Amino acid sequence: MKIRSIKYNKNDDNIFYFGGWDSNLYIYDIRAGSVVQKWDGVPTVEHDTIDNNGTNIVVSGYNKFRVFDTKMYKNEEYIFDSNDDTKIYATKFISNIYNNPNHSKING
């Protein structure tokens, strides 16, 4: 597997997320020294297309977004899925105007 994007958990420096062209998202825990969770069927990860807000992970690639809940270890939903030539090259969580860490929006 070729890793194309990697991000640390914003609430825990021992956890990081990575993905690549194999359409999997991996959660690695430095304390365990291994991958502790893997989700398959995610968009093909390219460039800066993984981000997190400490609770959720957003993964995007080509023309899809997918959000994961890191507390429940489950796939939330596709946010965006387009069959046209739309390409997503970067994805970021942005704090809302009230700066509340429990409310974020996705900008991609």
Image (cartoon, rainbow, N blue to C red):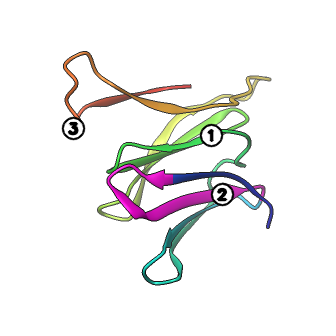
Callout 2: few (<14), some (14-19), or many (20+) C-alpha neighbours within 10 Å? Answer: many
Q: Which residue is mark 2?
A: 19
Question: Against 14, is 82 above or below?
Answer: above
Where residue 4 appears, as percent x and y from the top left, is 74, 51
> Circle 2 — which element?
strand
Q: Quadrant of the C terminus?
A: top right
The tag earlier along the polypeptide, 2 or 3, is 2
The amino acid marked with disc number 3 is Asn
Q: Residue at x 72, y 40 (%)?
A: 47
Callout 3: few (<14), some (14-19), or many (20+) C-alpha neighbours within 10 Å? Answer: few
Question: Against 45, is 70 above or below?
Answer: below
Residue 12 quadrant: bottom left
Left or right of 72, for residue 66: right
Residue 64 quadrant: top right
Distance between the alpha carbons at the discs numbered 2 and 1: 9 Å
Q: Quadrant of the N terminus?
A: bottom right
Q: Which residue is mark 1?
A: 49
> Circle 3 — which element?
loop
Where residue 72 appears, as percent x and y from the top left, is 30, 63
The residue stretch that appears in magenta: 8-21
Where residue 83 appears, as percent x and y from the top left, is 73, 29
The magenta stretch spans residue 16 = yes
